[in-house]
Image (cartoon, helix red, strand yellow):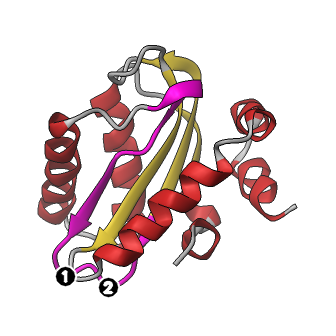
Amino acid sequence: MTLLEALDKDLVKVPLTAADGRGAVEELVSLYAGKVGLPAKERDDMLSLVMDREKLGSTAMENGIAIPHARIEGLKASAVVIGISRLPIPFGGKEGTRIFFLVLAPAENPTEHIQILSSIARVCSSDLFVRMLQGAKTKDDVFQLFFD
């Protein structure tokens, strides 16, 4: 599965309102949970898994991008939740993070997880594309960038 196959316009948040990394991830997990109807306990468990993975090593990359992710037991399909912040958020990298790609993948399919992460890294290797993402004003703007 690629990033484009995992994208859903309803899983894009512009702008993120959080002032810290945990808050940003929480916004994205909550967006996903609301979309699929997860109970609060499962949402909190998912947030814990993502943050536990983040403790192993920051997923912040250069150009203000971070890819927090987790493999989730029992998850039926992979999902990518995108958040764009107007201001840089501290997230463990050298610079603040403005673009977040939250990747949630079934624990039973590690290959799919790796394919999505790789797909994100490829698309974000373009400085122009990253600048266009940072300048997006709406979720429609973000979604359209991937399909133009």
The magenta segment is 61-79
Identity of the amino acid at label 2? Lys
Q: Residues within 10 Å of mark 1 (few under 14, many from 20)?
A: few
Identity of the amino acid at label 1? Gly
- Relative image position of residue 8 (x, y in whole percent): 59, 68
Residue assigned mark 1: 74
Q: Residue at x 31, y 42 (%)?
A: 26
User: Going by the image, does 1 lie left or right of 51?
Assistant: right
Q: How many marks?
A: 2
Q: Residues within 10 Å of mark 2 (few under 14, many from 20)?
A: few
Assess whether mark 1 and mark 2 are in contact (beta carbons under 8 angstroms): yes
Q: Residue at x 29, y 81 (%)?
A: 109
Quarter residue 19 falls in: top left
User: Going by the image, does 29 lie left or right of 84?
Assistant: left
Is residue 1 shown to the viewer in this render?
yes
Residue assigned mark 2: 76
Nearer to the camera, 7 or 94 = 94
Tell whether position 78 is magenta: yes
Tell whether position 53 is magenta: no
- Relative image position of residue 106 (x, y in whole percent): 28, 76
Q: Is residue 124 above or below residue 90?
A: below
- Relative image position of residue 115 (x, y in whole percent): 47, 69
